[in-house]
């Protein structure tokens, strides 16, 4: 089952914060986050393993709540370069990675 | 490092023809992944290899698709015969580790992709 991402799209002004959610109906072992700009390949952001850890670098961080089978990506003080489509990929006990449909983020100056 | 290299970058072919996509992973990486991306289905994992051995090919849509990794520096994805519904962007990615996906924290580095159009 494909994880559900929300919101589907969001428009922000530079400097505002955003949260992108990813939820699954299956028990998860890890969650991957990628960003993809139009016409380009996905770029890795981070991977979270089950254990409820929070990871991040600079102004992008993420959390993983394995009990709720949810992960959230936090974008703080967004920059123009953050624009793109964000995908979560969930890995379950079958060791398969399944990606959500993506969240389109557009940052206005 | 040149990153993951894919060829061709664009391929236009007619239904029924054989298509071969090529990938050169980053040197020293031990895992290689083939993905397909379409508007309708999004990003899908087709198959992945650890140390040149196919680990999971359950994402391969049907027998028309086959993938090989004869050595650590080269992989191919072949579609024979091709159909219009195979039109998509095909990405190859590589990572350093060889552990199971569920326990891996290894970054996957994506190639630029091959845009395939089957007429």
Image (tube, grey):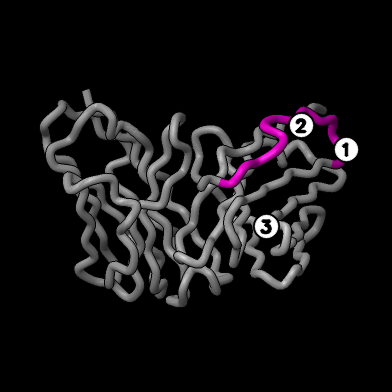
Q: Residue at x 50, y 39 (%)?
A: A40
Range of magenta residues: A3-17
Numbered disc 3: secondary structure: loop
Q: Nearer the viewer, residue B113 or A1?
A: A1
Q: Is residue B91 left or right of residue A8?
A: left
Disc 2 on helix, strand or loop? strand
Q: Earlier in the sequence, mark 3 or mark 2?
A: 3
| Residue B26, x across and y down, in percent | 41, 65
According to the image, label 1 marks what residue?
Answer: A16
Tell me residue A83's x, y (percent). 69, 36
* Dot 3: chain letter: A
Q: Can residue A14 be found in the magenta stretch?
A: yes
Subunit of mark 2?
A
Q: What residue do we see at 55% from left, 74% from top?
A: B103
Tell me: residue B11, above or below residue A47: above
**Residue A107: image tag:** 2
Indicate which disc, 3 or 1, sits on the residue closer to the N terminus: 1
Q: Residue at x 18, y 29 (%)?
A: B13
Front label number (3 vs 2): 3
When the figure is inspected, residue A62 is found, relative to residue B103, above or below; the finding is above
Q: Is residue B112 left or right of residue B56?
A: right
Q: Residues within 10 Å of mark 2 (few under 14, many from 20)?
A: some
Residue underneath mark 3: A69
Place residue A69 in its image quadrant: bottom right
């Amino acid at each position: 089952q494909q994880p559900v991402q929300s919101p589907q799209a969001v428009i922000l002004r530079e400097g505002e914060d955003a949260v992108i959610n990813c939820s699954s109906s299956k028990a998860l072992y890890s969650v991957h986050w990628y960003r993809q700009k139009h016409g380009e390949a996905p770029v890795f952001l981070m991977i979270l393993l089950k254990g409820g850890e929070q990871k991040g670098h600079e102004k992008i961080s993420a959390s993983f709540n394995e009990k709720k089978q949810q992960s959230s990506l936090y974008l703080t003080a967004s920059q123009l370069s953050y624009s793109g489509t964000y995908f979560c990929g969930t890995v379950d006990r079958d060791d398969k990675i399944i990606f959500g449909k993506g969240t389109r983020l557009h940052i206005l100056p | 490092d040149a990153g993951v290299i894919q060829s061709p970058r664009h391929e236009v072919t007619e239904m029924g023809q054989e298509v071969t996509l090529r990938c050169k992973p980053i040197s020293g990486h031990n895992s290689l992944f083939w993905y397909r991306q379409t508007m309708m289905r999004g990003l899908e994992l087709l198959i992945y290899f650890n140390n040149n051995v196919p680990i999971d090919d359950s994402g391969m849509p049907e027998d028309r698709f086959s993938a090989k990794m004869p050595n650590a520096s080269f992989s191919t994805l072949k579609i024979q015969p091709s159909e219009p519904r195979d039109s998509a962007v095909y990405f190859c990615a590589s990572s350093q580790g060889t552990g199971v996906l569920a326990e891996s924290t290894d970054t996957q580095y994506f190639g630029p992709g091959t845009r395939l159009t089957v007429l």
